[in-house]
DNA sequence: TCGATAAACTTAACATGTTAATGAAAGTCA
DNA sequence: TGACTTTCATTAACATGTTAAGTTTATCGA
C-alpha cells in the first residue's frame, strides 16, 4: 500500500498505476482472514479482540505493569487504560498500585478472569486447530518463520 | 494470540501458559513495524494510513463504487463513508451518483487528489526503498509470497 | 404490476487507534 | 537540597473498527 511506482501510460489515456505488492495490505488481509474465524466466538463471550489479547497475556505472563502489558498485547497505552477500566468493572482483572514505585500499577487476572479463560480457551484452540487442519500446519509454520525473521530484522536495525 | 495450549504447572506454583506462536499477533507486529516508518510522512501530509490506502487504490484502479473501494482498500463500509466525507471536503476526491443504479456511487480522484499523490508518492517510495535496502528485497519477497499463499489458501476454503 | 427481498450505502453507538498534553512520582546532578 | 529531566500512567480529541439498524433504490416472483 505504501510503495509507489512510476505511472504507466495506458492506451485509453488514463494514467493508472501498477505498484508492486504491498506489504502492509498483505499483512492486513492475512490478519483479517484469520480474525474472521475467531470473531464469532469472541463476540459470543462479549470480549473484543484486544481484550482477549490482554487477558491471554496476563495468563501467560502473570501480573504485569501497564507498559509491559501494553507492549506484549500490542495495544497502545491510552487504549489499555480504557480497556482496563472495563475489564476491572467486569471483575476479570485486579489492579493494584506498586509499593516500590507508586507510578506503576500491577495488573493481574482475578479468579473470575482465570475461570473465564479456562472456559473460553478450548473454543479458541478448536478454531485454531480447524484452521491448521484446513490449510496445513506447515504453511502456518513457514509463515510464522518468515514473520519472525522479518520482525527480527526490522527491530534490529530500527532506523539504521 | 488466539490459540491455546494446556496450562503448565510451574515450580513456583503459579499456573502460567506457554502457547505456541500467535499468528494474529505476529501479523500485527510486523505490520506495526512497517507502518512505523511511514507514519511520520503520512502525518506530515495530514493523511491517515487508511486515507492513504483509499487514495492509492483510486489512483491504481480509477473511479470505483464504494463497495469495491472499501474491499480493495481494506476498509469497512461505515469507515469509508466517514472518510469519503472528509476527503471530499478536502477536495481530494469527487463523488457522483451512478446514472444507471442510483444506489451506487462513483468515487474518483479530483485534480487536487491526483496532484497530491504525485507530490507525496515519491516520499513513500523512498521509505520503502530504504526498508528494502536495510532488510533485503529477497526477505520481503519471500514474506509476500508466503502471505499470498496463505491468503489464497484461506480465501479458497472459507468455511470449509 | 405489486409486494417481498436483496443490494448499496448510511447512520448510530460504542471500542480501539493515534497523537498531544497533563499529572504524579522517580531519577539526575550541580 | 532543589531545579531539571525522565518515566508511568491518564486524559482529551479526533479517526477508524465493528456491529446493528435504517434508507433508498433495484430486482424478483406471483
Image (cartoon, coloured by chain):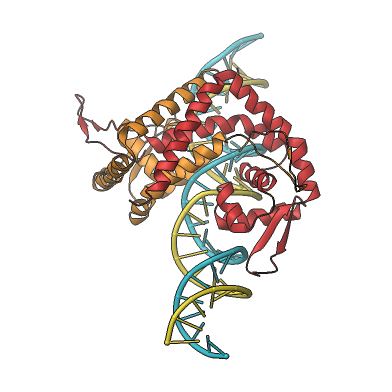
Chain colours: A orange, B red, C cyan, D yellow
From the viewer's perspective, is C1 left or right of B43?
A: left
- Identity of the residue drawn at 68% across and 59% down: B106
Quick check: can you spot residue B111?
Answer: yes
Quadrant where the image shows the C terminus of chain A: top right
Residue B120 position, x and y percent, is 74, 36
Residue B101 or residue C15, whichever sits in front: B101
Quadrant where the image shows the N terminus of chain A: top right
Residue A79 or residue C9, whichever sits in front: C9
Residue A109 position, x and y percent, is 31, 40
Quick check: can you spot residue A76?
Answer: no
Q: Which quadrant would residue B121 be assigned to in this image?
A: top right
Picture layout, residue A65 above or below residue B62:
above
Residue A18 position, x and y percent, is 65, 39
Q: Which quadrant would residue B116 be assigned to in this image?
A: top right
Picture layout, residue B102 above or below residue B34:
below
Label tally? 0
Residue B70 or residue A99, whichever sits in front: B70
From the viewer's perspective, is B91 left or right of A51?
A: right
Picture layout, residue B132 above or below residue B19:
above
- Identity of the residue drawn at 69% across and 56% down: B107
Residue C11 position, x and y percent, is 60, 66
Name the outermost residue toward the front.
A11
From the viewer's perspective, is A13 left or right of B155?
A: right
Amino acid at each position: 500500500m505504501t510503495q509507489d511506482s512510476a505511472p504507466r501510460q495506458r492506451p485509453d489515456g488514463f494514467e493508472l498505476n501498477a505498484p508492486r505488492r504491498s506489504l502492509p495490505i498483505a499483512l492486513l488481509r492475512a490478519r483479517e482472514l484469520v480474525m474472521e474465524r475467531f470473531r464469532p466466538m469472541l463476540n459470543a463471550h462479549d470480549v473484543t479482540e484486544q481484550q482477549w489479547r490482554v487477558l491471554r497475556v496476563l495468563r501467560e505472563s502473570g501480573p504485569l505493569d501497564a507498559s509491559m502489558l501494553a507492549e506484549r498485547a500490542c495495544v497502545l497505552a491510552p487504549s489499555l487504560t480504557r480497556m482496563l477500566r472495563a475489564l476491572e468493572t467486569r471483575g476479570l482483572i485486579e489492579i493494584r498500585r506498586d509499593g516500590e514505585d507508586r507510578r506503576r500499577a500491577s495488573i493481574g487476572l482475578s479468579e473470575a478472569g482465570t475461570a473465564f479463560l479456562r472456559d473460553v480457551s478450548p473454543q479458541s484452540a478448536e478454531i485454531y486447530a480447524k484452521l491448521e487442519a484446513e490449510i496445513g500446519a506447515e504453511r502456518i509454520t513457514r509463515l510464522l518463520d518468515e514473520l519472525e525473521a522479518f520482525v527480527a530484522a526490522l527491530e534490529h536495525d530500527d532506523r539504521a
